[in-house]
């Protein structure tokens, strides 16, 4: 399966390897022998489950005639796209959670910047809760999947008080 989000598709270099094998009517078994690698590793390489290292790129150049530099560039592009897909999928999940928070009320209280921009709201909520990803609030035990809007407000209020206590502790220590 090729990793994808609504906006991005990450095609592993293995897709190109598979095309090369089909063009040559070469089985994966024969290819594994020619590459001096296990069939399992070749299978994982084709499906993108393992990274295409420079050593593998050099072997591919010898076996398939495509320069190692090209294989390395394909792997780099795949890893960039894969990271982008993961981030987009994470953002989609986070956006759903962010919409559950009573953002307007939080902004009215001055806890977060008032904005209608969804991406900005997401960034503001991450900063407010001091997490890189809002889903971490579940992992930390701060939130439960069944929490309602009032509970989410209570969680936000608790976070605000924690921030204020920290500020006061710093001010009082001076």
Image (cartoon, rainbow, N blue to C red):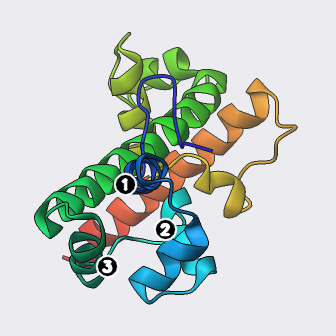
On residue 56, the disc is 3
Q: Label 2, label 1: how many angstroms apart (C-alpha)?
A: 8 Å
Q: Are marks 2 and 1 in contact (CB under 8 Å)?
A: yes
Task: Assess disc 2: are there few (<14), some (14-19) or many (≥20) residues with their C-alpha within 10 Å of its C-alpha.
Answer: many
Residue at image x 82%, y 36%? 147
SS class, disc 3: helix
Q: Label 3, label 2: how many angstroms apart (C-alpha)?
A: 9 Å
On residue 86, the disc is none
Does residue 130 show up?
no
Task: Assess disc 1: are there few (<14), some (14-19) or many (≥20) residues with their C-alpha within 10 Å of its C-alpha.
Answer: many
Tell me which label, 3 or 2, sits earlier in the chain.
Answer: 2
SS class, disc 1: helix
Of 157 and 91, the residue lying toward us: 91
* Image quarter of the N terminus: top right
What residue did someone put label 2 on?
A: 45
Of 43 and 12, the residue lying toward us: 43
Rendering coords of residue 164 (x, y %): 42, 54
Q: Looking at the picture, does residue 154 appear above or below residue 174?
A: above
Q: Label 3, label 1: how many angstroms apart (C-alpha)?
A: 12 Å
Rendering coords of residue 133 (x, y %): 49, 50
Q: Looking at the picture, does residue 169 appear above or below residue 84?
A: below
SS class, disc 2: helix
What residue did someone put label 1 on?
A: 13
Task: Assess disc 3: are there few (<14), some (14-19) or many (≥20) residues with their C-alpha within 10 Å of its C-alpha.
Answer: some
Tell me which label, 3 or 1, sits earlier in the chain.
Answer: 1
């Amino acid at each position: 399966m090729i990793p994808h989000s609504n906006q991005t598709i990450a095609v592993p270099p293995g897709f190109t390897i598979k095309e090369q094998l089909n063009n040559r009517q070469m089985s994966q078994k024969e290819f594994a022998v020619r590459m001096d690698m296990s069939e399992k590793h070749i299978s994982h390489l084709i499906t993108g489950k393992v990274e295409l290292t420079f050593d593998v790129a050099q072997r591919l150049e010898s076996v398939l005639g495509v320069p190692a530099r090209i294989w390395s560039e394909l792997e780099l592009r795949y890893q960039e796209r894969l990271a982008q897909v993961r981030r987009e999928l994470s953002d989609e999940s986070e956006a759903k959670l962010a919409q559950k928070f009573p953002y307007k009320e939080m902004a009215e209280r001055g806890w977060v910047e008032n904005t209608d921009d969804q991406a900005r709201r997401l960034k503001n909520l991450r900063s407010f809760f001091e997490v890189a990803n809002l889903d971490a609030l579940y992992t930390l035990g701060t939130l439960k999947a069944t929490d309602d809007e009032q509970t989410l407000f209570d969680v936000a209020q608790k976070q605000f008080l924690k921030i204020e206590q920290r500020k006061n502790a710093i001010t009082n220590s001076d």
